Image (spheres, coloured by chain):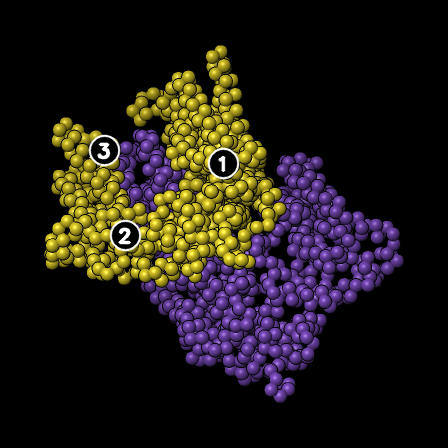
Chain colours: A purple, B yellow
Amino acid sequence: RPSGRDAQYNRNVYFDTLPQAVRLYMLYNHWALKVLLYFFMLVNLSLAIFEDPAVYPLPIWATMLVEILCLLIFTIRLIHYAKVILRDKFWKDPKNICIIVILTLTLVDMIIYGALKAANYYGVRWSRVLRPLLLVNVTEGRQLRRAFRSIRNALPQIFYVFMLFMFSILIFSLMALKLLGKRGLTNINGTPYFTSYLEIMFDLYVLVTTANSPDVMMPAYNANFFFAVFFIVYILINTYIFMSVFLAVVYNSYKKYLKEEVRQLVRAKRHKMVRAFGVLQEQREEGGEPVVTQASWNQLVRLVQPNLSNAHRELLWSVSDDKNQGAIGKVAFVQLADLLNIEIITIKSRPHPLQSLCPSLYQSAPSKLLCQLVQHRAFVMVYDLIILVNAVFIGLDEENPMIANSEWVFLALYILEILLKLYVFEPRVFFSKHSFWNWFDTIIVISALIATIINSVMKSSSHFSSRQILDIVFILRVLRLIRVVDSIKRFRIIINTLIRIGPAILTFGQLIIVVYYIFAMVGMELFKGKVTFYEQSSTNLAKAYCGNPLLNGTDFAKLNYCKNNFNNVVSSFILLVELTVVNQWHDILYSGFATVTHISARIFFVLFHIIVVIVILNIFVAFVLEAFFVEYSVDKSDLQTSLERKIEELELAVTMEDNLVNAMETIDNDLGGSQSAKPNLPSLMFKIASKRYRTVDALLQRIFEADLDPEDFAENDDPETQGNENFANPLFSHA
Amino acid sequence: RPSGRDAQYNRNVYFDTLPQAVRLYMLYNHWALKVLLYFFMLVNLSLAIFEDPAVYPLPIWATMLVEILCLLIFTIRLIHYAKVILRDKFWKDPKNICIIVILTLTLVDMIIYGALKAANYYGVRWSRVLRPLLLVNVTEGRQLRRAFRSIRNALPQIFYVFMLFMFSILIFSLMALKLLGKRGLTNINGTPYFTSYLEIMFDLYVLVTTANSPDVMMPAYNANFFFAVFFIVYILINTYIFMSVFLAVVYNSYKKYLKEEVRQLVRAKRHKMVRAFGVLQEQREEGGEPVVTQASWNQLVRLVQPNLSNAHRELLWSVSDDKNQGAIGKVAFVQLADLLNIEIITIKSRPHPLQSLCPSLYQSAPSKLLCQLVQHRAFVMVYDLIILVNAVFIGLDEENPMIANSEWVFLALYILEILLKLYVFEPRVFFSKHSFWNWFDTIIVISALIATIINSVMKSSSHFSSRQILDIVFILRVLRLIRVVDSIKRFRIIINTLIRIGPAILTFGQLIIVVYYIFAMVGMELFKGKVTFYEQSSTNLAKAYCGNPLLNGTDFAKLNYCKNNFNNVVSSFILLVELTVVNQWHDILYSGFATVTHISARIFFVLFHIIVVIVILNIFVAFVLEAFFVEYSVDKSDLQTSLERKIEELELAVTMEDNLVNAMETIDNDLGGSQSAKPNLPSLMFKIASKRYRTVDALLQRIFEADLDPEDFAENDDPETQGNENFANPLFSHA
């Protein structure tokens, strides 16, 4: 009966209902196996570090062996998946076919490459570009697949705008050629200015990214200031208007298709819940509506979420069964998946351990005074002041012994703060899962303490301080200052929104890594070894032109860009980041890689710009915009408020006055009241962590919630939905 | 009774109801006076071209005299306004106070400056920065005031994000100082790398704009590639995340406040219409609802829009009085202002003039065949092909006599196209107000013809071709190619959206000009004459360092940026555009203006960046995004559809099949049918130009339409609305 859990996480899996099959399915979804899969995925990807061109070269047999191991793991995982779901469903699912094709091609490539190498021929490991695609196609890569699908769906729209944009560049180039080509103007290095149509097109394309502004304009502007008008009109139309239109188009289709997908997922989830309802339902009275009793409901929830506390489960039941009939109908039952997604913090208002150990001391007047002091607003302010003073001290020269010793004072003060708070607040509350800043503080302070001690020991014993440890100490010291942000409410709101969209940004991180990896692999094959970096200390004469005489006198060499190369996977990634940032990219590719290879090398860079900057970065911006608007507009979903109402009815709510849970979330400020003043509180309290989402799905669902009908059960199989090809997974599970 | 018109255009003016007062009011709103006002505003602004530092120097007395004339005009206009509206309302309106203050200060400044100059002292014309503020404060600058208000309202939100952003830069700078400051790294020019906290902060601020990427990273990256991680994290957080958050915050508050303002305007408009209803209403039957009869309604409409055709007016009446009762109630009356804002194209299906002149010839078989040919799809395709061939010919060398002569062939072909279309389509339809592309084509082709003829005449007579005329010929030739875009439907949609948001972009253009002008004035006082530009041909040795020895060897001089200076208002504006584009701005300010003046000159540039790039450009992007979303989502307002329904009911609609009006809008394609085939059409037809907006207000109103209640008359004076300080104008007129 795992359809409940599938519904909760929006998984779409088919399986038999035999006990063995269920066990296999449970095993497939075990967290350890997933971690193992991602670990080997990581190993597989990081093989690029050891393969030629390598950061740390390893013999071919070693990397090949590891790669075969990885392939084996992926194959086993896939076979496991095939055992879990129905055979025909498995073969209909494009992601499985993709994995099989990738694995086969990789194996074929390895055999060919091994044979070529054995015979001392030149070989290319072309299958390396396929590696990151595994990330997309495994069952767990749902978010990533969705991101790719929304890009694919936005492509037609982007394409038309892009064609118009290219047309505009063509027209402007033609105009520039006619206006400026025959005037005998020269570039700063003496070459003729704007005489070749292709060069003009490329220069104007680069101008859209603003990378060569104002240099590309200067020769014409120096000749006559009217020509500046040409460039200003060009920038206005192409950089400002067209780039905004790209964002608008990407944002709009992103929103549209994501909405459609989420709508389908919700329908599928509801449908699964309806099926589960069909299995569990009972007819309580003749002719009455079928219902699910509390007993079978409890059994289901225990199965789906074994580590849910009894109190929490009972709370959910009382929300579903709000008329207290001992059984719930279909509508209430279907809500279960959403209810389970609302995160509830269960708070056991335990007494402080010191109170149990020596109550007389803990309850004494000085102890109570201390508690009040620590919870006072002034305490937070004093520590904010200490942090600011600390910031000034960090800025000063740390060679000065006075400054160096002051660090111990600050460390002591920070440790004292944590100890004081632990004295006042119950430790398990202080270190609860949601107390981001408490964890942050404690980890930073303790790491700083350890690093500082190691540093001093090393210094006093061997009169030699390790640069690495000192760096860590510095970083930790500076990071400590961030805490001050949390004291100002306005800042806290912004920071919290940023933290909340963090997981979704990680999806984009994966997306970027997939694209970067592919470009890095291709780039390394095309450009490896063309440019050499010599250490600062090197006296090699080739240092002046990055080891390639073709670069002699180019901007690339003059600007000392030799380390921007494709000689290994790490420098490739850093170079791709620089290209994403766009500035100077024409120097990198034009006077760099196009010079050392061929003019067509530009195609690689322009393609990278179109894919990463125009498409992916715009989707990223669109996502951040949408997430912020959601934060600004919607506050809580209906379900959450009904859950909150229930909690309040039951008088189990953590009210604002006693602030215990607020304190939990942002424990180091607004500690107005004192929680020990109210001894007659129930021993168990709840609070909705309303602002956090368990899954990215839940966040997306909330974004588009307004358009979803809660009564829509999707009971009649919608042919449109079934036939939708955007939707890689079949929709209906066999519960 | 001008409240109807006021309501239509959302003006908020108070006036007496005496005939003389009404005449004064009508005069105040006369278009000629407005054009005169804007003309003198332009003269006043362009005085900067002739004042020191001047492009074309004029003596001080000349510019002063012109300025006094301008001030006089503005004063008269203000007095006129004071006569038109009630006295206490005049003094309560901040925009009037602003104008008075600006005029007084300007006069005081002129007197001081004149006296100082007469005594040969140094004087600064500081009041010049106030000039563009007049643009904002005149009655007609409503859109601009609204844009400024939305910026002002967004400021608190932006401020908090900005503080957090600055905090992030401070923290990263401190970390960079600690990590990199002591390593003895050097910049490319040998100066120590990252040793001064202030320099690091500035470098990292510039890195946010990506202008110094990857140069600022290279020394650290060359030392150890782990440092690249520091910069990548920095760029991710500050460039990508924070800049997106800025856009989100600006966009969100822009939308919020604009919505609120439009809501208030709509309420005020409805209120005025209710007042007008009160004046015009009659009690038709005992105890019945008060109504307005068709006679008084007609009188009102004729007064408000004298040049509305009778047919159009009757159509509007029949929409309002949809039950044909000869009188309308309040709800229908209030819609009038919105109805008048819907643009309706009245089409008189007149026969072609040739048909009246010589019907036998025009109706003959060859003539009919010609008409069919011209209206055929293939005709458009043939001309698209011609345009493409023309594009290739333009790209070729025009010195070649064959190519030069081919230009005559193309010109002849284009003229033939226009003549053929004029033969087939009724000329007044062909050149109707909405036929953008017809006008575009004709103007471009005829100008090209004239310019080409002048050019050939000059060439053959004096064997000398004027560069300017040749430039114009080239530009016109290339512009002609744009026409091809209109043939592809997908492109047409995008282009039409862009054309539609054009007027609103002009508001941003004014906004930018106000800000640029102020910065240009300040910049000229600070930096004039610090940098000198020498012509290419000059042999002056100072050319190598822009006439300022301090610049010797700096990037500014090396990159030949000497013309990027504040020596006159034109080059100031171009420099400010370059700073808006951001790239290389650190070179301009750092090794340019900070070197020749003082390090604090950076403040000017950073301030400009914050105001223009972070605030204004983001609002611009927000506007384009919103306009595109409106185009994508909403299609027509309720009123428009009811108007369309009525037009269809009356069988006066221009149906899609006969395509006459579609042809009008995009005459050169989709000319499927033939309009002369249906002789039994009514002689008058209507079409809603649904996709165009008469006023920017109407566009804004449509953007926020969904949230407005059509039944909300705002009859009870809302104290909240009245007391709203965001709203500079009082809301209720005395009709």
State the image coordinates of residue A208 (x, y, percent, origin top left): 37, 44
For marks 2 and 1, the one nearer the N-term is: 1
Q: From the image, tell me which residue sits under label 3.
A: B469
Q: Report the front residue among A437 and A715.
A: A715
Q: Residues within 10 Å of mark 2 (few under 14, many from 20)?
A: few
Callout 2: SS: strand
Quarter occupied by residue A131: bottom left
Residue reaching furthest front?
A: B286
Q: Report the front residue among A484 and A628.
A: A628
- Label at residue B348: 2
Q: Say which amino acid is labelled 1.
A: Leu
- Label at residue B194: none
The subunit letter for the residue under badge 3 reads B
In 3D space, how far apart are the residues under numbered discs 2 and 3 (Cα atoms)? 41 Å
Q: Is residue A706 visible?
A: yes
The residue depicted at 57 percent of the width and 55 percent of the height is A633
Q: Is A485 above or below relative to B520?
A: below
In 3D space, how far apart are the residues under numbered discs 2 and 1 (Cα atoms)? 40 Å
Q: Say which amino acid is labelled 2.
A: Lys
